[in-house]
Image (cartoon, rainbow, N blue to C red):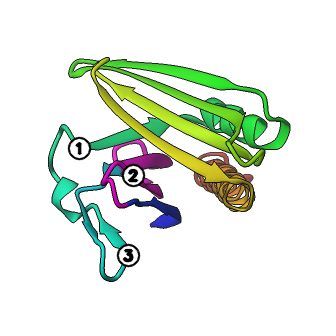
Amino acid sequence: MDLKTIFKFNPYTTGHALFVKANKDFKKDDLQLFFHVLKQTSWDDKSKVGSCRASFGDEQKEVYVKFNEDEIGGLIRTLEKGVDTNFFHRSASGSTQISLKIYVDKKDQKKFSLSINKHSSIKFGISIELGEAVALKNALEEYLSCLYKSRIQKSLKYQQENFKRD
């Protein structure tokens, strides 16, 4: 399920798309949250529309990052307080660095910068405007709320099934 989508395409085809996705981890019977980021691959100058379709399935142009609840808390803190946050993920396939920072653009507007470096050489970056940041923060908070409600329901069900009163 897509919680939030941000497209930042440009005529130079250096843009990115961010999909914030929540789904169920059936092995753990728990919810999980991912950022799916795709590099822009085309631009139609006539319609002023970019696309990232050709990035799907291309390891050089696509990255998935799974976040745990503490990391989500760090992202929310950055979006609320403007304090930088950084994460480092290591797996059998390599390492990924994630950062979310606030910055001031050339027009003196505050924005956030999401950077993901995959295997130290493949870089993804997307600018998040303040309105988008509010919507993203709300989506992340809603995800955490759903995660905790789900865990409480599982715990209550387990207690009812295993600790019946006579």
Question: In the rendered structure, does residue 21 fall within the stretch colored magenta?
Answer: yes
Q: Residue furthest right?
A: 81
**Amino acid beneath label 1:** Lys
Nearest the eye: 49 or 70: 49
Name which residue lies at 73% across and 62% down.
131
Is residue 83 visible to us here?
A: yes
Report the side of 7 relative to 81 (left or right). left
**Amino acid beneath label 3:** Lys
Task: Judge whether 127 appears above or below 116 on screen.
Answer: below
Q: Residues within 10 Å of mark 3 (few under 14, many from 20)?
A: few
Please give the label number shown on residue 16: 2
**Amino acid beneath label 2:** His
Nearest the eye: 27 or 37: 37
Q: In the rendered image, which quarter is residue 129 located in?
A: bottom right
Name which residue lies at 76% across and 48% down.
109
Magenta residues, start to end: 11-37
Element carrying mark 2:
strand
- State the predominant SS element of the stretch in magenta: strand
- Mark 3, mark 1: which one is toward the viewer? 3
Where in the figure is residue 142, as x and y percent of width and height? 69, 59
Question: In the rendered structure, does residue 57 fall within the stretch colored magenta?
Answer: no
Nearest the eye: 59 or 141: 59
- State how far apart marks 3 and 2 are (Cα): 15 Å
Q: Earlier in the sequence, mark 3 or mark 2?
A: 2
- Mark 3, mark 2: which one is toward the viewer? 3
Q: Which residue is mark 3?
A: 48
Element carrying mark 1:
loop
Q: In the rendered image, which quarter is residue 119 located in?
A: top left
Q: Earlier in the sequence, mark 3 or mark 1?
A: 3
